[in-house]
Image (spheres, rainbow, N blue to C red):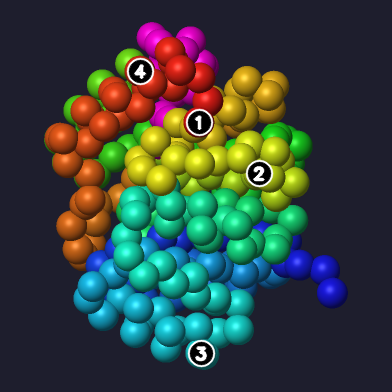
Amino acid sequence: MSGPDLSITIPFYNEEGCCEQVLQKLTAALEQHTIAYEIMAVDNGSTDQTGHILNRIAQSNPNVHIVKIARNEGYGWGIISGLNTCTGKYIGYIDGDTQIAPDEVIRVYQSVLTNQADIGKGKRIERFDGLQRKIISKIYNVLFYFIFSCPIHDINAKPKILRRTLYKQLGLKSKDWFIDAELVLKAHAAGMRIDEVEIEFLKRQDGTSKVRMATIWEFIKNLWEYRFHGPL
């Protein structure tokens, strides 16, 4: 039996307040557009009720599968763990909060199909996630372009969607927040075409952001190591 058309990985870390809403809205949108799908809901070492909620949802929807990580080893590891289990022709990932509308996921997916791009990703035009996040993102994107001259405007923006066969070629290894940059850099070096699709980035409805000002030092460290020591 062939796999679905689209597999989406969603890492959840202590998102008991919004994980059900995220899954319900995304599955409804995918079904409305008659897209054959599967969702890999990653319980990324949560210590709250996230895991119980995800299990309940998976029991009622055969297209939702749970990837259980006993101890949180980082944002990137949650994504890689989910992507490695995907069976769809196209695979991708979004964050486990309410900041990316389901219609934006479908729009990026349809853009990849229409434009025959290797990778489709979001580019946040309207942002409602606060000044601190905007400053962190701006600094990171400027540093990224300055160091690598890679013509991507919004490195960390999701969704990111690509053909599963291409994902296997990339060999992603970053367990932390560098996962987005690693994907873009390796895809760019391999000559893959990356299309950015303008999206609206919504305000969080529940829970708290896992990104802090200290995260930018992690970004800088990873950028430096990648630039001078090569791919992971």
Q: Looking at the picture, which amino acid does disc 3 mark?
A: Gln
Which residue matches tag 4? 224
Please, what secondary structure does the residue beneath circle 4 have?
helix
Looking at the image, is mark 3 or mark 4 nearer the viewer? 4
Say which residue label 3 marks.
Answer: 59
Three-letter amino acid code of the residue under disc 1:
Leu
Label 1–label 2 contact, CB within 8 A = no
Q: Quadrant of residue 170?
A: top right
Give the secondary structure at mark 2.
helix
Distance (Cα) linking label 1 and label 4: 12 Å
Q: Earlier in the sequence, mark 4 or mark 2?
A: 2
Tell me the CA gap for discs 3 and 4.
44 Å
Ranked by sequence position, the earlier of labels 1 and 2 is 2
Q: Which mark is residue 167?
A: 2
Disc nearer the start of the sequence (1/4): 4
Report the Cα–Cα distance between label 3 and label 1: 37 Å
User: Magenta part mainly helix, strand or loop?
Assistant: loop
Q: Quadrant of the N terminus?
A: bottom right
